[in-house]
């Protein structure tokens, strides 16, 4: 066992989430991966534990809590089921946090309380077919009309969209203004003209739902705008900085799960008359996995601590996501290797981990985009 840098309160939270995740979520992970069903019982259970209110102010139905605490919860959920942690992080750290950070008092009181229960899900819709990394290139339009915005266009790869009651979305009022023309809106899923087309065939995190979202003259009241006109893009970039800490925590959870599975198997499997854990080659692999996981966890703790202390944290959040996602992919690779042929087959957990890990280098800003952000922050302009 390695030591912990957690406070007493954080340890209690970690142990509570871990216990629930090990008992309830992990045993169902292979089933949900195989069926691609949305894991409602995991979500309800996390809601009953109060985890959908974590990091949300008490006056809006949350339980308060720090960025460090949210990261701890995400890590423990991801350790049991990466797909469930994707649903949780997209809901909490993207959509609900956006409303909390940029909503008016009235918007927060109207939209957030049901979202803190685990009975109502939110989605965050930025990406479009023509604009993923290039988020400023979005084409979905919002046109003013009689106190409303009329939305037309479509989003793709939107996590939680099929189940969502609430969407936080970005649209442009005037493409010629570039990022300054972008606004953020909160929209209810029963808005006429909204169509959700679920996407199938994901490599991993199959129990998390992903969909195309189409707006055909959807009318959204102007009072549903989050922040001012022209400020939607800047708000999104700020919000993504903090949500990256959650994704980095998800990476550690999966990296830890890979290590746990590999260590267990290496002690059970025998070759050449001894445990494979006694071969130095495998010991070094295990040591590298544990060391990288610890380093990634420290980066997450640093980024989260800086945010909680009100200090700049964007560079550290990108570093945590960049490094953590690589560790998740590398640990998954080593975990399969340590399992030999068995690791190439379901239902070993490591086969799933290998497929689940890759998305972490892609969503919430690819690794190339993280490097771009870090370079902008580190390397002074001429
Ligand atoms: C399962 C899943 C869930 C998702 N959930 C959501 C969600 O809930 N909400 C949402 O809004 N989006 C979501 N996304 C979208 C995700 O954030 C984007 O896929 C991601 O940002 C990459 O965008 P893209 O797919 O358009 O790739 P592209 O932007 O086309 O990138 C293609 C390649 O080019 C590289 N590249 C692009 N620009 C640069 C550059 N300037 N310098 C160097 N390299 C560059 C990229 O790193 C990548 O390797 C999800 C995606 C997936 C797959």
Image: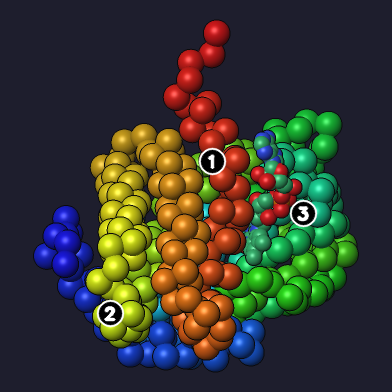
Residue bearing mark 1: 370
Residue at x-position 47% and y-position 90%: 28
Nearer to the camera, 258 or 228: 258
Residue bearing mark 3: 128
Q: Is mark 2 within 8 Å of ligand 1?
A: no
The spot of residue 194 in percent (x, y) is: 80, 70
Residue bearing mark 2: 275
Dot 2 falls on a residue whose secondary structure is: strand
Distance CA(mark 2)–CA(mark 1) = 40 Å
The spot of residue 85 in percent (x, y) is: 47, 71
Relative to 354, residue 35 above or below: below
Nearer to the camera, 282 or 289: 282
User: Looking at the image, which residue sits at the far top?
Assistant: 382
Figure quadrant of the N terminus: bottom left
Distance CA(mark 2)–CA(mark 3) = 50 Å
Which corner quadrant of the image does residue 367 belong to?
top right
The spot of residue 329 in percent (x, y) is: 50, 59
If you read the primary sequence from the N terminus, does the residue marked by circle 3 or circle 1 appear first? 3
| Residue 224 visible, this orientation | no
Q: Nearer the viewer, mark 2 or mark 1?
A: 2
Residue at x-position 33% and y-position 61%: 281
User: Looking at the image, which residue sits at the far front?
Assistant: 272
| Residue 261 visible, this orientation | yes
């Amino acid at each position: 066992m390695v030591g912990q840098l957690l406070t007493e309160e954080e340890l209690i939270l970690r142990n509570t989430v871990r216990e629930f995740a090990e008992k309830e979520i992990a045993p169902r992970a292979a089933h949900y991966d195989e069926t691609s069903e949305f894991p409602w019982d995991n979500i309800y259970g996390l809601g009953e534990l109060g985890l959908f209110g974590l990091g949300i102010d008490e006056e809006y139905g949350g339980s308060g809590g720090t960025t460090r605490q949210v990261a701890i919860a995400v890590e423990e959920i991801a350790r049991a089921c990466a797909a469930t942690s994707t649903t949780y992080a997209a809901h909490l750290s993207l959509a609900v946090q956006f409303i909390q950070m940029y909503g008016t008092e009235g918007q927060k009181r109207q939209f957030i309380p049901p979202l803190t229960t685990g009975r109502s899900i939110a989605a965050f819709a930025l990406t479009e077919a023509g604009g993923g990394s290039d988020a400023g290139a979005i084409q979905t339009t919002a046109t003013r009309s009689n106190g409303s915005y009329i939305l037309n266009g479509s989003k793709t790869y939107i996590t939680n969209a099929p189940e969502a009651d609430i969407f936080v979305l970005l649209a442009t009022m005037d493409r010629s203004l570039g990022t300054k023309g972008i606004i953020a809106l909160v929209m209810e899923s029963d808005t006429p003209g909204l169509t959700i087309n679920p996407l199938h065939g994901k490599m991993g995190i199959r129990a998390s739902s992903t969909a195309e979202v189409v707006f055909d003259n959807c009318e959204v009241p102007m009072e549903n705008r989050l922040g001012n006109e022209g400020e939607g893009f800047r708000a999104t970039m700020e919000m993504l900085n903090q949500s990256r800490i959650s994704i980095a925590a998800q990476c550690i959870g999966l990296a830890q799960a890979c290590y746990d599975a590999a260590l267990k198997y290496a002690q059970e499997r025998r070759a050449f008359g001894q445990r494979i854990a006694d071969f130095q080659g495998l010991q070094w692999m295990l040591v590298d996995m544990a060391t990288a996981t610890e380093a990634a966890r420290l980066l997450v703790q640093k980024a989260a601590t800086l945010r909680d202390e009100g200090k700049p944290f964007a560079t550290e959040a990108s570093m945590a996501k960049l490094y953590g996602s690589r560790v998740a992919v590398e640990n998954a690779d080593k975990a399969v290797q340590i399992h030999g042929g068995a690791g190439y087959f379901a239902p070993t957990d490591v086969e799933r981990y290998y497929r689940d890990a890759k998305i972490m280098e892609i969503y919430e800003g690819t690794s190339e985009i993280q490097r771009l952000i870090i370079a902008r922050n580190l390397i002074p302009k001429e």
